[in-house]
Image: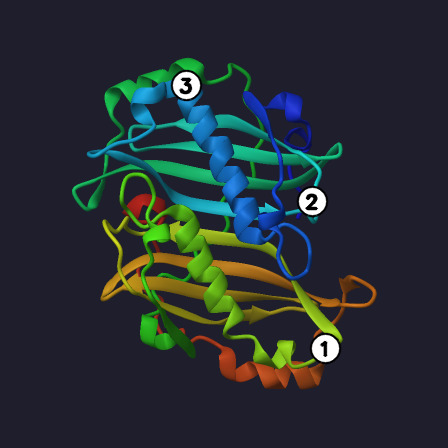
Amino acid sequence: MKTPAWQNDPERYDFRHTLALQYAHLDTIRHANNVAVHGLHVEARVRYQLAVLGPDHLFSDAVLLRPCRTVTHFLRETHYPHDVTCATRLIAVSAQTYRLVTGLFQQGECVGVQDCLIGAWHADRWVALPDDVRGALEHSRAADDVLVSDWPPMPPEHVAMTGYPAESEISGRYADLDPDVVIGELALSRYIEQSRAGSLKPIRNDPALGMLVASVDLSYHRWHHGRANVRVVCGLDRIGNSSFALAGAAAVGEERLVTARSTMVLIDREKRRPTPIDDDLRASMAPLFIADESAGDERTACGTPGG
């Protein structure tokens, strides 16, 4: 993934802070887990909002500032125990949303970027940004414009939950709730990770092969108040030369919380390099394709119709 050049320079962001990567962030590949990396982007956003909006907007029992969409690119592996510099830049503000780009830097290199569209959630729907929030953001926005990547096509929201070949249920946990008592952003990210892990037996059955997450695109539909059991689904969206895309979703009952598209790269475990998806593996993966039988209602983030 080629990012605009400015995103590789932490000095081009509005706000920066440094965090210590924790041993608990590591996964079985012994680098920072993709959900833990997503968490670093969340921390970058929250610290920025705390600096710009003040402590009164850190928590809320009414209007919640929550992402409508996040697109996270994992450019390099993030390793323990090196510190991570987290940087945030405000890109745009409108009546309904604001757009932030965050970058993560370790040992002088950009290891990941995230594009995030944030809206206001209240009374089970997206609403206009509060006037004071919009005003503070507009006042803080840098005068110089920067180039940003176009949003990729939306994850396949129109595919019904029954159109996915892999399905499981995750029991609701107290730890899934964030400080505002809704199922949190990282819990949703973890649900999608778990849905991926349960659908890739053809690859996991070959000890010579491994996978790396290249990007995760999450479209958030609703923020569920309180703990609940969650139904997760997953399936193949496309297969390329050495990469493939998995679509997934998580729902509480009939209420979909999030739809995802994750781009995965097949690697040779010994060489730690991408390797082609051969014909036999393609054939074994074919039953995992989602049943995309409807063009659906193409929508953009925050529930607004797409153009």
| Distance CA(mark 3)–CA(mark 1) | 48 Å
Pair 3/2: label in front: 2
Residue type at mark 1 is Pro
> Residue 296's x, y, as percent?
32, 64
Residue type at mark 2 is Tyr
261 on left or right of 257: right
Q: In this figure, which residue is indicated by the disc labeled 1?
A: 207
Marks 3 and 1 close (CB-CB < 8 Å): no
Residue 166 visible in the snapshot: yes
- The answer to which of marks 3 and 2 sits earlier in the sequence is 3
Q: In this figure, which residue is indicated by the disc labeled 2?
A: 80
Q: Residue furthest left?
A: 123
Tag 1's secondary structure?
Answer: loop
70 on left or right of 109: left
Residue 137 visible in the snapshot: no
Question: Hey, which quadrant is residue 131 in on the image?
Answer: top left
Residue at the spot 55% in from the left edge and 17% down from the top edge: 144
- The answer to which of marks 3 and 1 sits earlier in the sequence is 3
The colour scheme of the drawn protein is: rainbow
Q: Nearer the viewer, residue 301 or 218?
A: 218
Residue type at mark 3 is Val
| Distance CA(mark 3)–CA(mark 2) | 30 Å
123 on left or right of 25: left
Which numbered dot is residue 52?
Answer: 3
Tag 3's secondary structure?
Answer: helix
